[in-house]
């Protein structure tokens, strides 16, 4: 039996009962420490709902641990003795409890992990087993490769997990990827299931009051909070998605629709990222639904690819490349983030919809993040650190390991193409094809150079013209540059002038 007193710090995104650092805990002797600290809640202006989710889920988790007979030390944000930082609290409690050993599972944020490593505290670190691919395993997969490709990594993860494989190891359905089937716009008359909401209990109500009092300057609504804060609630959300959302997830994965913030998306990312759901269980539930003929293969494969492909891949890239990764800026962008990202006050309907629901629910789905708010930031040349901070602040599920590579790499191409082979730039035509936003917009998506033309159109061509030297040689950009070269000089000039005008407006702090 363990004779020493262990102090196990559990961070706000580590609320899993089978967390590596909790294994082997001696219930008589050891203590689990959870701390609400100002530094973590305010190093960027996190959406108030995100702070509420984490604090409420932490308090519920602490209660659940105590019910299992585990000794828990919980520090609330308003505790007068609270030092305000994770290392500060760990040091204070080690001393107060005279703990012999400090145990901690790897952090999700390089900044925090580094500050703990620099703190001089003797911490015993545990690898985070909640992911399919460890940091080390990813590094050895990436070794010697100049450029990484998610698709090849994903196949490795399919082989490793055995998900959707035939007996001979080949992929079910004869292909690894059914993405071409997953690009449908939402047809008229198709309605998404109404989102499952979770009413606040006494713990959550207390947290909401604390957040309202301490974070009123942060952007975003608090009164619409309805997220799951316990393992049981997260499971209910997942079961609801399995029954009502997953079958159509593949088909309408990329679709966007006015006043439909969630469509057929699972809304589980925040619960998964903080440890209320288990990755392996989610994947096996999806596979089982496919074998039971409840969902088509494009939905099953598409969902599993997001989880064991993209999610694991971005984490691998993050830990392989930090801290240098965060300062990537291939295009040398320096334009400040427009104020309307924080208010939603813009005449561009697509942007207003995506930003508005982000402020209201701390949520937007992948295509809104990538092809609307992200696409705009790319085309407008926003400084990568500013747009990354916005994503980290505004989304309920945003933690550095997953937000940074998605934004800096996938959206801004600021890592020089390490994570993705080409920038996801698009004109308003893409948004028109995948949504109904353009029908109710002040701008005309069919126009490019007039005063009422869709801003995405001229900005798209302006982006391609101003970065010709960097992008022209990229094979995957060949067709778009051929299209640009086919345009007459006057047309190119008119697009450039309209782009210049729009960028000048941004520089003058004006919305459009
Ligand atoms: P669904 O659309 O139902 O997808 C299912 C699950 O797949 C998600 O819950 C998520 O766990 C996983 N997933 C899908 N795509 C990705 C991806 N690219 N990277 C990692 N996981 C993925 N996701 C986060 O969890 N946190 C972030 O901070 C985050 N920032 C993003 C920033 C940008 C610019 C972009 C383009 C994407 C970002 N994503 C992030 C990925 C994705 O947008 C969200 O995971 C998804 O919208 C969450 O909603 P959902 O649970 O309804 O997902
Ligand atoms: Fe967005 Fe342009 Fe469509 Fe308006 S017209 S909704 S700005 S893509």
Image (tube, grey):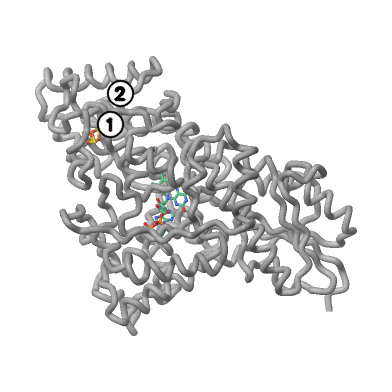
Q: Which residue is mark 1?
A: 348
Front residue (pair 325, 251) = 251
Residue 224: tell me if it is visible: yes
Residue 240 placement: quadrant: bottom left
Where is residue 63? Give x, y as percent: 69, 65
Tell whether circle 1 marks a residue whose Cβ is less than 8 angstroms from ligand 2: yes
Residue 158 sits in quarter: bottom left
Disc sitting over residue 512 in the figure: 2
Q: Is residue 307 left or right of residue 368?
A: right
Label 2 neighbour load within 10 Å: few <14, some 14-19, many 20+: some
Residue at point 48% right, 41% down?
Answer: 221
Is label 2 within 8 A of ligand 2 (CB to nearest ligand atom)?
Answer: no
Vertical position of residue 17 compared to residue 453: above or below: below
Residue 332 is at least partly visible in this image: no
* Quarter of the rendering containing residue 294: bottom left
Mark 2 secondary-structure assignment: loop
Estimate the x, y position of residue 333 in percent, counting from the top left. Answer: 42, 27
User: Which numbered disc covers residue 510?
Assistant: none
Q: In the image, residue 267 lies at what x, y percent?
A: 42, 57
* Residue at 73% over, 50% down: 76
Residue placed most toward the observer, 473 or 332: 332
Question: Which image quadrant: the C terminus?
Answer: top left
Q: Nearer the viewer, residue 56 or 400?
A: 56
> Is mark 2 in CB contact (under 8 Å) with mark 1?
yes
Q: Can you say whether 333 is above or below 497 in the image?
A: below
Q: Secondary structure at mark 1?
A: loop
Q: Residues within 10 Å of mark 1 (few under 14, many from 20)?
A: many
Give the image location of residue 236, x and y in percent.
46, 69
Residue at far bottom of view: 167
Sequence-earlier tag: 2 or 1: 1
Q: Quadrant of the N terminus?
A: bottom right
Judged from the image, the quadrant occupied by ligand 2 is: top left
């Amino acid at each position: 039996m363990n004779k020493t007193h262990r102090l196990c710090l559990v961070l706000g995104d580590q609320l899993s009962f089978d967390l590596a650092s909790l294994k082997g805990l001696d219930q008589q002797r050891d203590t689990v420490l959870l701390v609400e600290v100002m530094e973590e809640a305010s190093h960027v202006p996190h959406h108030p709902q995100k702070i509420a989710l984490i604090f409420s889920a932490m308090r519920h988790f602490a209660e659940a641990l105590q019910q299992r007979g585990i000794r828990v030390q919980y520090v609330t944000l308003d505790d007068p003795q609270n030092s305000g930082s994770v290392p500060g609290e760990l040091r204070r409690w080690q001393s107060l409890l005279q703990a012999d050993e400090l145990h901690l599972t790897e952090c999700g944020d390089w900044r925090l992990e580094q500050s703990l490593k620099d703190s001089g505290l003797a911490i015993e670190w545990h690898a985070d087993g909640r992911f399919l691919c460890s940091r080390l395993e990813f590094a050895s997969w990436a070794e010697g490769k100049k450029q990484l490709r998610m698709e090849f990594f994903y196949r490795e993860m399919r082989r490793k997990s055995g998900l959707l494989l035939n007996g001979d190891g080949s992929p079910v359905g004869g292909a690894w990827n059914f993405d071409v089937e997953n690009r449908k716009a939402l047809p008229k008359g198709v309605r998404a299931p109404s989102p499952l909401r979770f009413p606040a209990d006494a713990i959550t109500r207390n947290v909401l009051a604390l957040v309202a009092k301490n974070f009123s300057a942060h952007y975003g609504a608090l009164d619409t909070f309805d997220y799951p804060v316990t393992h049981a609630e997260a499971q209910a959300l997942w079961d609801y998605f399995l029954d009502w959302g997953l079958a159509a997830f593949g088909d309408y994965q990329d679709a966007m629709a006015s006043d439909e913030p969630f469509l057929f998306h699972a809304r589980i990312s925040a619960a998964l990222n903080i440890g209320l759901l288990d990755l392996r269980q989610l994947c096996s539930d999806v596979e089982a639904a496919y074998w039971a003929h409840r969902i088509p293969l494009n939905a099953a494969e598409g969902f599993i690819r997001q989880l064991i492909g993209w999610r694991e891949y971005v984490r691998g890239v993050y830990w392989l490349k930090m801290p240098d990764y965060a300062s990537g800026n291939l295009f040398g962008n320096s334009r400040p983030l427009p104020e309307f990202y924080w208010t939603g006050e813009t005449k561009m309907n697509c942007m207003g919809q995506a930003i508005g629901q982000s402020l209201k629910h701390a949520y937007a789905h992948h295509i809104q993040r990538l092809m609307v708010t992200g696409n705009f930031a790319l085309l407008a040349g926003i400084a990568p650190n500013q747009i990354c901070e916005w994503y980290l602040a505004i989304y309920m599920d945003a933690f550095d390991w997953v937000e940074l590579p998605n934004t800096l790499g996938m959206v801004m191409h600021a890592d020089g193409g390490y994570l993705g082979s080409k920038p996801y730039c698009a004109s308003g035509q893409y948004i028109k094809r995948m949504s109904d936003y353009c029908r109710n917009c002040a701008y005309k998506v069919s126009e490019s150079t007039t005063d009422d033309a869709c801003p995405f159109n001229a900005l798209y061509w302006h982006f391609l013209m101003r970065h010709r030297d960097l992008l022209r040689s990229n094979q995957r950009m060949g067709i778009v540059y051929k299209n640009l070269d086919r345009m007459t000089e006057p047309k190119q000039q008119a697009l450039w002038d309209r782009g210049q005008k729009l960028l000048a407006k941004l520089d003058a702090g004006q919305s459009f």
